[in-house]
Image: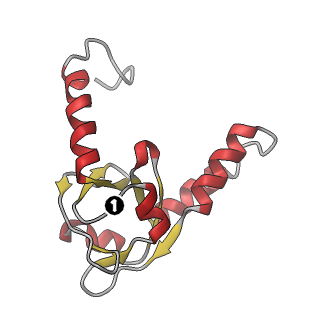
Amino acid sequence: MFLGTHEPKLDEKGRLILPARFRDELSEGLVITKGQERCLYVFPANEFSLITERLRQAPVTEKKSRDYLRVMFAGAHDEVPDNQGRVTIPSGLRTYASLEKNCVVIGANTRLEIWDSTTWNSYLTDREKTFADVSEEVLPGLF
């Protein structure tokens, strides 16, 4: 499980140093792809394989499924972190998520998310009020 918020920086070669607490779980490989709200999703390779198996069940006759699968897989990049825990974020993914230098990496249970720090702070400020004011269950039966 991935938890917490970290603030690494992209270097001039588009590399990001993964937070030390996540490196062991990602050391065998990972997949970076486009996420919702213009962030990037980072999955351990084995977790991405499980997701891929589930997505194989999506009906290719349904346009929304085709669209989602195309964007997700066309933007996916597999990577093995180097000895310093760095991964290269391809330029297309950096552009998608508006990543330049200051980033935020958040733990999001089974994945990491990489955000531009300004985008993340704006998103978090907007969503924290909604989160604090929730008066009914978001996921019925869990809380």
Horizontal relation, residue 60 to residue 20: left or right: right
Q: Can residue 1 be seen in this snapshot?
A: no
Q: Which residue appears at 27% of the width and 71% of the height?
A: 10
Quarter holding the C terminus is: top left
Return the residue nearer the eye: 142 or 129.
129
Q: Is residue 136 above or below residue 60?
A: above
Return the residue nearer the eye: 76 or 120.
120
For label 1, the residue is 99
Three-letter code, disc 1: Leu
Q: Quadrant of residue 134?
A: top left
Q: Quadrant of residue 61?
A: top right
Q: Quadrant of residue 82?
A: bottom left
Horizontal relation, residue 96 to residue 49: left or right: left
Q: Is residue 24 above or below residue 126?
A: below
Horizontal relation, residue 25 to residue 72: left or right: left
Return the residue nearer the eye: 119 or 68.
119
Residue 91 position in % (x across, y down): 45, 70
Residue 6 position in % (x across, y down): 18, 58
Return the residue nearer the eye: 77 or 21.
77
Is disc 1 placed on a helix, strand or loop? loop
